[in-house]
Amino acid sequence: MTLAATFEAGIRPAVGVVAMDMPDIDHPKLKQFYDYWDAKRAARAMPARADIDPLEIRPLLTNVALVDVEQTPQRFRYRLVGTELGGILKQELTGKYLDEMPLLYRTFAASAYVEVMQKKTPTYTTFDTVIPAIFRAVRYKRLMLPLSPDDGQTISMIMAGFYRF
């Protein structure tokens, strides 16, 4: 099922999803991640990928994903995925597209990528819900940060941080 078909089918994250404003980031490592991104953007709407040095955020990398944004058609490809995120999903995501992921994963991820693309701003979300179909609690905090090649308007990559709680 493609990303567009996922939305056409009405698949959206379930109850327990709370979006917060940036000043309300309550996870210390995600706040550190946001502060790094904010410092790198300077006076621009968002930093460029070239501004980001993974060595500067080394302690966070196990919980970070870098996601390439393809514009036409719009698709999201996992360029780099930290070991903690891969462990949560129990599979290797590097090199895969979001629309190739299992439906349940797309349910929680697709709307976040689309929201970042539409708003062109970071999004911070707390998930605290139970998925009845698999009898599993989903509890994590996610911060999505857009990157632009140079114009501050086109998003070419999204950096995402994920932490379970």
Image: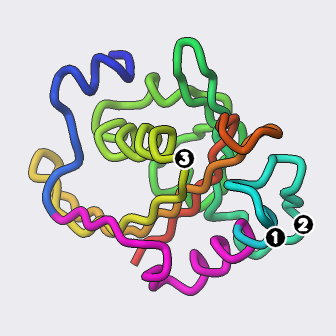
Place residue 69 in its image quadrant: top right
Residue shown at 38%/64% (left/top)? Answer: 125
Place residue 75 in its image quadrant: top right
What is the count of numbered marks?
3
Badge 2 amino acid: Leu
Seen in the picture, residue 134 relative to 137 is either above or below; the reply is above
Badge 1 amino acid: Arg
Secondary structure of residue under mark 2: helix
- Residue 107 falls inside the magenta stretch: no
Which mark sits nearer the N-terminus, 3 or 2? Answer: 2
Residue shown at 17%/48% (left/top)? Answer: 134
Residue shown at 64%/40% (left/top)? Answer: 67
Secondary structure of residue under mark 3: loop
Where does residue 70 sit, x and y in percent of width and height? 63, 23
- Residues at badges 1 and 2 in contact (C-beta under 8 Å)? yes
Q: Residue beneath label 2, please?
A: 55
Residue that protrudes farthest toward the left in the picture: 132
Q: Residues within 10 Å of mark 1 (few under 14, many from 20)?
A: few
Colour setup of the view: rainbow
Image quarter (top left, top right, bottom left or bottom right) of the C terminus: bottom left
Which mark sits nearer the N-terminus, 1 or 3? Answer: 1
**Span colored in magenta:** 16-37
Q: Residues within 10 Å of mark 2 (few under 14, many from 20)?
A: few
